[in-house]
Image (tube, rainbow, N blue to C red):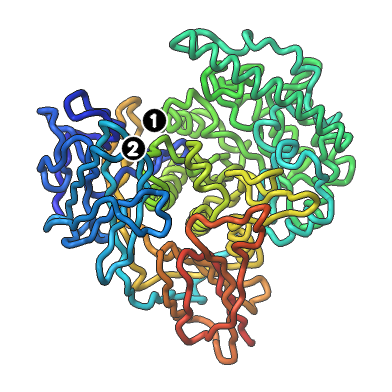
């Protein structure tokens, strides 16, 4: 289907009356760098503003809508318009879908247009037609607002998907999975080596753990196993937050308040509470727990702040020497966490010593690395890449990455530290169902762009993703997506895509495992003295557990998969004749992203007796899967399917902690395997040698 675009950017109209100026929101996704990406732009039928200022349909070039309307297009997954689709509008409170407030059918171009002048509030748009699965979107309708809920429909019947595995073509598994336990925020009333915690973590799939966490690592004093609360109390916010970094006085005061409340007062309070509960921050408990579950620790060194005004580098080296003296081994050391500057910008963590200065940071890292490698010769040291600079956009971060590679020695560090979160922005009007499709598109594209970028800029270096997962960008997203089945599919899909690139990306650390209450970043939460597992936690146990137990990643392809196409805005970096980035010369281009219904990979266990096939079925329908395995003898082999599935936005709660739990069934190795809709799982094939 031919599409018409006007200009170089892609826009979605989300409101305002037709007579006045149109409210246009640019969709810019820095997927090339995977650091602060927005999700995909609307897929096929967005409306753009022409040079004459009228609204035109992106596919037809027509002006099909008026103010106070619900208008859009219904297509197949590959963007072909569907005629004769029944569109019904229901009040959101009509949960049984008994009384539509309006109904009509799409025209030959898949278009529909409903007068919404008398409607206001929350509604459901339902699209249905024979041979397709019914789909619904949530929308909000307000006075003077024209809403564009575009839909694509899945075919009701799909061919059997064939997962082909060649066990003779394999690569060693280099990916490690674990958690960034936000120590005092996540579990302030529990010790890490308590039985419920340890037993849960044994089943989590983790073989690495991060200590002492993220931002809090920049305030950690190893000698007292505590925050530097007395030193923090002496910090004057006005000395840290610079007025010149803000355009307005209002912005300046907002950042001052954030720094005072979120960093100073909050950390002093948490540190005090942690002491009351644990006596100390909890390193000994954390190390004990990590040893019991067989996980290595990624230590995050404080390179920017030391108690009593001591040199931070000396303080960190003393910590490493102390651990050596206790007979402990440090395998992985990160030098700082997200030292974002300049101080006082809205994203700053406002670290003293102005470590956002790249020259100063790299000199400090060289000094620390030289001394620490004398203590632990085999230690791998990681330095920051995307946590430096103003965070004004992908272009600047790319420049910093290239400066690190081009202008400084490469021999003192082993890895580059990246925090690649999947993140939504503030486009609430689209509804969670539509946003789901777009976020899966981002999951695919962010991995492809990022891996190519990092391999080019940092050849031969490992990439450590020491914070990752899904972050909701809005209160509505947090309400809709917190630890439910959708988020479980999304994060499992994201993880499996990264495992295909473990020649470069060698760690994936989820932020975080266990929280005190259900939380968008966590996988589980405490209920009294027990732990409630969520679909997200179970998903990681299934897919990451397979990787943890494996020695080799096998060649895997999926045939007859099926897919849908989304449009996304990609930030394209312009370069000169020598391949160098031209500052400020990037541009946003709209690209198609084909999202497969099934994401799958395969692994061989360390003892060679088990094949693992972790998968995600993103389809709203059950699928038949057939395995085509070469390179191993399957005579006498047996198989089982372990999976979770449930309603798209279903979750486990305090009242219903077992709403979605893993189910295990025996399946035939050579027959069709029925996989439920919206499922994450692993097929385990036991091979008899």
Above or below, 60 against 233 in this view is: below
Find disc 1 in the rendering and name its residue.
Answer: 395
How many C-alpha atoms fall within 10 Å of the one at disc 2: few (<14), some, or many (≥20)?
many
Q: Where is residue 77 in the image (x, y as percent from the top left)?
A: 28, 60
Find disc 2 in the rendering and name its residue.
Answer: 571
For image coordinates 36% across by 69% down, the residue present is 561
Between disc 2 and disc 1, whose residue precedes?
Answer: 1
* Label 1 secondary element: helix
Q: Position of residue 509 (x, y in %)?
A: 62, 48
Q: In this view, does 651 lie to the left or right of 163?
A: right
For image coordinates 39% across by 30% down, the residue present is 395
Distance Cα–Cα, label 2 vs label 1: 9 Å
Q: Which mark is in front, 2 or 1? A: 2
What quarter of the picture does the N terminus occupy? bottom left
Identify the image quadrant of residue 268.
top right
Q: In this view, does 50 lie to the left or right of 530?
A: left
Residue placed most toward the observer, 337 or 197 = 197
């Amino acid at each position: 289907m031919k599409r018409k675009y006007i200009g170089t950017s892609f826009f979605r109209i989300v409101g305002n009356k037709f007579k006045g100026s149109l409210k246009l929101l640019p969709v810019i996704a820095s997927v090339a760098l995977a650091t602060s990406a927005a999700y995909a732009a609307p897929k096929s039928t967005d409306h753009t503003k022409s040079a004459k200022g009228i609204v035109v349909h992106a596919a037809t070039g027509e002006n099909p809508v008026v103010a106070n309307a619900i208008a859009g297009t219904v297509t197949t997954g590959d963007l072909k318009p569907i005629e004769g689709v029944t569109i019904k509008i229901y009040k959101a409170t009509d949960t049984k879908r008994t009384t539509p407030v309006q109904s009509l059918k799409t025209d030959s171009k898949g278009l529909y247009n409903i007068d919404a002048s008398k409607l206001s509030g929350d509604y459901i748009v339902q699209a249905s037609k024979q041979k397709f699965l019914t789909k619904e979107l949530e929308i909000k309708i307000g006075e003077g607002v024209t809403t564009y809920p575009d839909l694509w429909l899945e075919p009701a019947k799909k061919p059997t998907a064939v997962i082909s595995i060649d066990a003779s073509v394999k690569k060693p598994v280099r990916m490690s999975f674990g958690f960034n336990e936000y120590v005092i925020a996540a579990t302030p009333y529990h010790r890490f080596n308590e039985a419920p915690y340890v037993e849960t973590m044994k089943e989590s799939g983790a073989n690495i753990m991060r200590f002492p966490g993220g931002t809090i690592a920049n305030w950690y004093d190893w000698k007292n196993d505590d925050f530097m609360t007395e030193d923090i109390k002496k910090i004057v916010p006005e000395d840290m937050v610079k007025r010149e970094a803000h355009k307005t006085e209002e912005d300046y005061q907002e950042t001052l308040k954030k720094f005072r409340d979120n960093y100073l007062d909050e950390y002093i309070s948490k540190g005090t509470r942690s002491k009351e509960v644990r006596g100390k921050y909890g390193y000994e408990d954390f190390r004990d727990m990590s040893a019991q579950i067989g996980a290595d620790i990624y230590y995050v060194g404080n390179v920017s702040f030391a108690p009593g005004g001591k040199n931070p580098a000396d303080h960190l080296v003393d910590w490493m020497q102390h651990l050596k003296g206790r007979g402990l081994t440090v395998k992985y050391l990160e030098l700082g966490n997200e030292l974002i500057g300049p101080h006082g910008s809205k994203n700053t963590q406002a670290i003293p010593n102005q470590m956002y200065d790249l020259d100063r940071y790299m000199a400090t890292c060289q000094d620390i690395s030289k001394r620490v490698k004398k203590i632990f010769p085999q230690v791998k040291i990681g330095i920051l890449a995307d946590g430096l600079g103003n965070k004004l956009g992908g272009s600047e971060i790319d420049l910093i990455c290239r400066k690190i590679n081009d202008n400084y020695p490469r021999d003192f560090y082993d890895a580059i530290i990246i925090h690649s979160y999947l993140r939504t922005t503030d486009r609430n009007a689209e509804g969670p169902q539509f946003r789901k499709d777009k976020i899966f598109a981002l999951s695919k594209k962010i991995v492809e762009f990022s891996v190519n970028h990092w391999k080019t800029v940092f050849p031969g270096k490992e990439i450590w993703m020491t914070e990752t997962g899904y972050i909701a960008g809005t209160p509505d997203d947090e309400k809709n997506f917190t630890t439910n089945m959708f988020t479980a599919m999304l994060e499992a899909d994201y993880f499996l895509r990264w495992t295909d690139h473990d020649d470069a990306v060698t760690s994936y650390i989820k932020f975080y495992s266990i929280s005190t209450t259900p939380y968008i970043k966590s996988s589980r939460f405490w209920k009294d003295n027990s732990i409630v597992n969520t679909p997200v936690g179970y998903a990681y146990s299934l897919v990451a557990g397979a990787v943890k137990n494996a020695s080799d990643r096998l060649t895997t392809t999926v045939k007859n998969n099926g897919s849908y196409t989304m449009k996304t805005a990609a930030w394209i970096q312009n370069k000169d004749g020598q391949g160098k980035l031209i500052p400020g010369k990037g541009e946003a281009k709209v690209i198609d992203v084909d999202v497969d219904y099934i994401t799958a990979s395969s692994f061989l266990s360390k003892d060679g007796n088990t094949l693992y096939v972790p998968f995600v079925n993103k389809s709203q329908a059950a699928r038949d899967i057939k395995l085509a395995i070469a390179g191993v003898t399957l005579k006498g082999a047996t198989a089982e399917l372990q999976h979770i599935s449930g309603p798209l936005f279903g979750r486990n709660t305090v009242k219903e902690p077992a709403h979605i739990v893993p189910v295990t069934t025996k399946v035939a190795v050579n027959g069709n395997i029925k996989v439920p809709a919206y499922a994450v799982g692993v097929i385990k094939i036991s091979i008899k040698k």
